[in-house]
Image: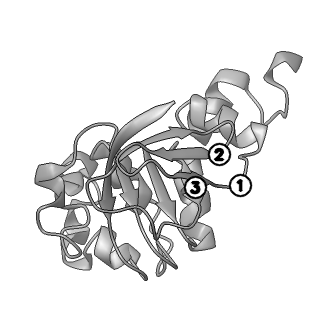
């Protein structure tokens, strides 16, 4: 179960909003780069986000380049999951690979600052502030396993292979 505060963003948050191109020189220093995550969309985000909080977007979150460090620096900033109406396919895959859950759902009823509780196994999202309950698609078991291990690299290190049932090894 994940619990935290919602940080609401709009539609079309690109990888340039997440990791500004002018900071490309920091790609080899991801902890430093994470201090600037989403600053072009909200200059105060990094100062306000706490470990376990959520990024909530609209349509087409993560569009743009295939910068795999974009979801990674969001995770390094303390974000435990991203919720959005739709997500760029490569951003979604990169997020799962680095161990950052992405849930597709109708985010219209979520307001900035709402307290959320998310059950990744069921796809149930409770807005504890306004009492509404949302649903995302149920996450496949293999993705839950990858997320539980912290990402695809850690999953492969642990199990030595990409297996559907880790108890097979």
| SS at badge 2 | loop
* Residue 137's disc number: 1
- Of 137 and 100, which appears nearest the observer? 137
| SS at badge 1 | loop
Q: Residues within 10 Å of mark 3 (few under 14, many from 20)?
A: many
* Residue 57's disc number: none
Q: Position of residue 84 (x, y in %)?
A: 51, 66
Looking at the image, residue 102 sits to the left or right of residue 128; the answer is: right
Q: Position of residue 161 (x, y in %)?
A: 77, 32
Pick whichever of labels 2 and 1 is earlier in the sequence.
Answer: 2
* Residue 123's disc number: 2
Q: Residues within 10 Å of mark 1 (few under 14, many from 20)?
A: few
- Of 49 and 160, which appears nearest the observer? 49
Whole-angstrom CA distance, mark 2 to mark 1, is 6 Å
Residue under the image location 34 percent in, 40 percent down: 4
Q: Which residue ends up furthest to the front in the rendered image?
A: 131
Residue 69, by quadrant, is: bottom left
Tag count in the figure?
3
Q: Position of residue 116 (x, y in %)?
A: 41, 44
State if disc 1 and disc 2 touch (CB < 8 Å). yes
Looking at the image, residue 117 sits to the left or right of residue 136; the answer is: left
- Up the image or down, 65 lies above or below 28; here it is below
Q: Which residue is mark 3?
A: 103
Q: Residues within 10 Å of mark 2 (few under 14, many from 20)?
A: some
| SS at badge 3 | strand
Looking at the image, residue 61 sits to the left or right of residue 156; the answer is: left
């Amino acid at each position: 179960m994940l619990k935290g505060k919602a940080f609401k963003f709009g539609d079309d948050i690109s990888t340039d909003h997440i990791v500004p191109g002018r900071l490309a020189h920091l790609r080899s220093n991801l902890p430093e780069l994470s201090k600037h995550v989403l600053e072009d969309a909200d200059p105060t985000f990094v100062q306000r986000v706490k470990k376990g909080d959520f990024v909530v977007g609209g349509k087409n979150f993560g569009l743009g380049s295939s910068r795999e460090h974009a979801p990674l620096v969001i995770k390094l900033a303390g974000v435990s999951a991203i919720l959005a109406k739709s997500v760029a396919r490569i951003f979604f895959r990169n997020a799962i690979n680095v161990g950052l859950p992405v849930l597709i759902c109708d985010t219209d009823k979520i307001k900035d600052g709402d307290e959320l509780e998310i059950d990744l196994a069921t796809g149930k999202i409770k807005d504890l502030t306004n009492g509404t309950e949302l649903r995302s698609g149920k996450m496949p078991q293999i993705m839950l396993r990858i997320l539980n291990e912290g990402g695809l690299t850690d999953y492969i290190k642990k199990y030595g292979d990409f297996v559907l049932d880790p108890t097979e090894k």
